[in-house]
Image: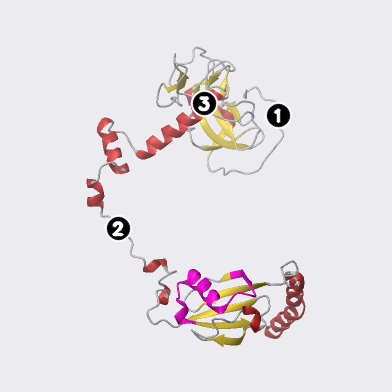
Amino acid sequence: LKRHSNTMAGSMNNSDMIALRQYITARDEVQYNNLHKSTLMVDMTHSNLKQRHVEIRLDLSTKIADLRDVIKRKTGTGPGFQLLQFILGGKVLFEVPPGREDERMLGYFGLEHGVTIHCVDLDPNSGSRNGQYEDVNLVKKYVMSDEEYNKRKGTLRDWERQQKAKDSTFTLAKHAREHREMMEAQRQAKLGLPLPTGFEIDSNGEVIRVREERIAESTVKSPNPDAPGEESVEGIKVGMRCEVRPGSRRGSIKYVGIIDKLGGGGYWCGVEFDEPVGRADGSVKGERYFEAMPGYGGFVRGKNVEVGDFPERDILDELDDSEDEL
């Protein structure tokens, strides 16, 4: 088995890796063809830094002294501490110590595109040593204690305290939820859509909240004594996952209660399906009981609903006509 693995690795090195190399380097020989003849493309690296400055454009008339200024701006190392190494193909072609060849132009050295100019920082007190320029873990973070933060005015925590003094039930989570609901109600109002339950438009044309939320589990008695009663939805609660017959359609319970305007009244289960396999959008004759996109909602008799562990899945079963679903 070991010999077989080595054979496979060798095969990959001899074929696939060669093909990959050819693909990556396919146009390397022409990548600099459109550059001006006086332009030199170089990479720059530094002995104390991880950063690599790729494909920096220099002119062949650039003097070493000017090159040192460029390196200083990019790395912070002064010209007097720069030992420059010119590297190509992993080999150091030559070195230029500090203060040497400063008046020479790059063209004098016969450099090729793709050469790496590596700066060795000789400054024993260099600010870039030991990751000082790049390692954020070395930066001392300001940490405020809870006691000090509690004393500050105008903070989120201070505002939360003020709101709780007005309303003992206030929480930031509740505030965020109510804000999202209001934004959605205002959006639907602008689009001319029915408002979500608990919102209405006042005399000034503004969207206002009229109550916290619709009571999902109604306790009102149905005027039809023959309609399915509360026992027909026993054990079914809002928020439960369910599977609905016919079709084994899955979804979530969004409403449980009496709907007198629907199919003889009595108790119904409002379901938001995972797929567009329903016949409603959560409303009945203009009255909304829960939110759902058209085709994703349905009102089903309790006998056709099974609650339990029914995770979402992709189903689009054919629907059979049923008098127990509207």
Magenta-colored stretch includes residue 23: no
Where residue 169 sits in the image (x, y, percent)?
A: 31, 33
Where residue 62 sits in the image (x, y, percent)?
A: 60, 74
Tag 1–tag 3 contact (CB < 8 Å): no
Image point 75% across, 77% down: which residue?
18
Image point 50% across, 73% down: which residue?
69
Instruction: Using the numbered discs, state the Cα–Cα distance from disc 2 to disc 3 in whole angstroms.
Output: 58 Å
Q: Is residue 77 left or right of residue 64?
A: left
Q: Which residues are magenta?
A: 54-82
| Amino acid identity at mark 1 | Asp
| Residue 143 circle label | 2
Secondary element type, mark 2: loop
In the rendered image, which residue does mark 1 sit on? 320
* Position of the N terminus by quadrant: bottom right
Where residue 260 sits in the image (x, y, percent)?
A: 53, 15
Camera-side residue of 88 and 319? 88
In the rendered image, which residue does mark 3 sit on? 232
